[in-house]
Image (tube, rainbow, N blue to C red):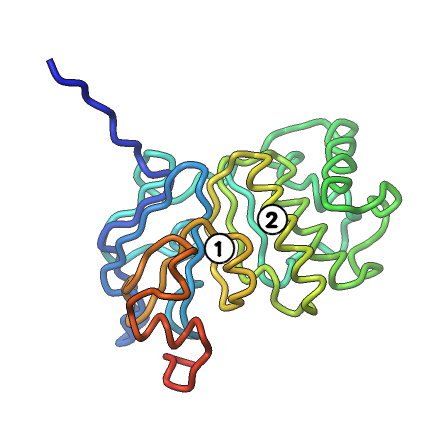
Amino acid sequence: MGLYRAVPVPKIELRGVEKAFGANRVLRGVDLAVEQGRSLVVIGGSGTGKSVLLKLILGLLEPDGGEIRVGGRRGPADPRKIGMLFQGGALFDSLTVWENVAFALLHAHGVARPRARAVAVETLAKVGLAPDVALRRPAELSGGMQKRVALARAIAAEPEMLFFDEPTTGLDPIRAAQINALIVQCVQGLGATALTITHDMASVRAIAHDVAMLEGGQIIWRGPVERLDSPGDPCVEAFVHGRAESVAA
C-alpha cells in the first residue's frame, strides 16, 4: 500500500479573480496562492491592481468573478485573524499610541483595557519603542516612529496573517531597512503568513520568501526571491532593474 502525503491547503488562495471598474478591467483572472508561514511579495507598476488585489482579499471590495479562499474557507479574510499595516500608517489621531496598538484587542477581541494596555506596551517594545511612547499621540511622533506604531498595531493580537501595503513608502533608506528587519522578525516570531505589495525592491529582497509580479491584470511571474536577478522574463527583469522599458510608471 502506497504512502500518501496530504497536499497543504494554501492560507490565501485566489482562483481566476476578476475585477473591473467600468470599462477598466483591472484584474483579469488572477491565480495566486500563499502557503502557511510564507512571506509573498506582489510587485508591479503603479496602476496594475496591486492595491485592488489586497482590498479584495481583505473584503474591502467584492470580486466580479473567480474565487477567494482565506484560511481554508471561501470569502475574504476574517478581521480577527489578520494584522494590517497600511501605507500611510492610518493611526487614529484622537487616540493615544497604546490605544492605537490595542485597537483590535479592545474592539474585536474584547480584551479588558488594563490587559490591552499591557500588551500594547509589550508590543511597542518589540518594535523598539519605549514605554513612555504609549501615552503620546501619533502627531507627537516622527514618521519612522509612526510606522513602528502601525506595525505594533498589526501584530499586537498575534494574527495568523499579516498584510503590508507599501510598508517603506516615505521612509529614508535607514528607516526603511529598520522596518524591513522588524517585519521579518514579526513574521518569523508569529509564524504568520504574510502578503505584501510594494515597488521597493530593497524591501522585496529583505522580506520575501516568494515574489509574484502583477501585470496586465494577471500574475505573469512567480518564484522564490532568489530568482529575481535572473527571472527568465524580460518584463520582470526590466521592472526589477528599473530599466526604461519597464512597465507602467
User: How many residues crowd around disc 1 within 10 Å: few (fewer than 14), some, or many (20 or more)?
Assistant: many
Residue type, label 1: Thr
Q: Quadrant of the N terminus?
A: top left
Secondary element at tag 2: helix
Q: Residue at x 50, y 35 (%)?
A: 160
Disc 2 to disc 1: CB gap under 8 Å = yes
In three-dimensional space, the C-alpha distance between marks 2 and 1, rounded to whole angstroms, equals 10 Å
The answer to whether residue 161 is left or right of residue 119 is: left
The answer to whether residue 158 is left or right of residue 245 is: right
Q: Quadrant of residue 171?
A: bottom right
| Residue, far top | 1
Q: Is residue 44 above or below residue 150?
A: below
Q: Which mark is residue 126?
A: none
Residue for badge 2:
183
| Residue, far right | 132
Whole-percent x, y for residue 172 in the image: 70, 69
Residue type, label 2: Ile
Q: Is residue 30 above or below residue 187?
A: below
The answer to whether residue 139 is left or right of residue 6 is: right
Residue for badge 1:
196
Q: Quadrant of the C terminus?
A: bottom left
Q: Residue at x 45, y 75 (%)?
A: 241
